[in-house]
Image: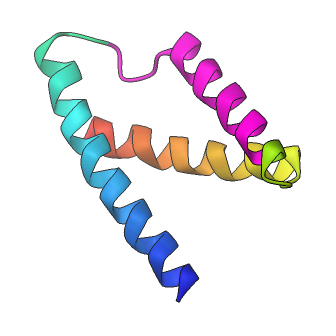
């Protein structure tokens, strides 16, 4: 059940990412923003560690989600 919820949340996140991509294009903003990405990554790692998750695991999963998010924004 939890795995299904994770997939549902990821789907919702990607829909939002797609919308954000449209807004970025309208305002001639770069899809990839390195400083913002680093802030998000650092926050996720810290939050994950606080929840008892391995920092490397959190980093890898966050990178995968971010990669797909960028792909959605580019469409």
Going 27% across and 11% down the picture, which residue do you hit? 29
Residue 62 image offset from top left, x and y in percent: 64, 45
Residue 8 image offset from top left, x and y in percent: 38, 72
* 56 with respect to 3 (left or right): right
Going 46% across and 49% down the picture, which residue do you hit? 68
Quadrant occupied by the C terminus: top left
Q: In this picture, is 73 found above or below 11?
A: above
Figure quadrant of residue 12? bottom left
Extreme front residue here? 50
Figure quadrant of residue 43? top right
Going 23% across and 20% down the picture, which residue do you hit? 24
Magenta residues (range): 30-48
* 73 with respect to 2 (left or right): left
Q: In this picture, is 65 found above or below 31?
A: below
Q: In this picture, is 61 found above or below 33?
A: below
User: Which one is nearer the viewer's eye here, 49 or 32?
Assistant: 49
Residue 27 image offset from top left, x and y in percent: 15, 11
- Is 38 one of the magenta-colored residues? yes
- Is 41 one of the magenta-colored residues? yes
């Amino acid at each position: 059940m939890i795995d299904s919820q994770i997939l549902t949340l990821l789907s919702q996140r990607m829909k939002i990412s797609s919308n954000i991509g449209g807004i970025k294009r309208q305002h001639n903003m770069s899809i990839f923003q390195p400083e913002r990405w680093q802030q998000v990554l650092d926050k996720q790692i810290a939050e994950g560690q606080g929840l008892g998750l391995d920092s490397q695991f959190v980093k890898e999963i966050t990178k995968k989600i971010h990669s797909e998010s960028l792909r959605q924004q580019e469409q």
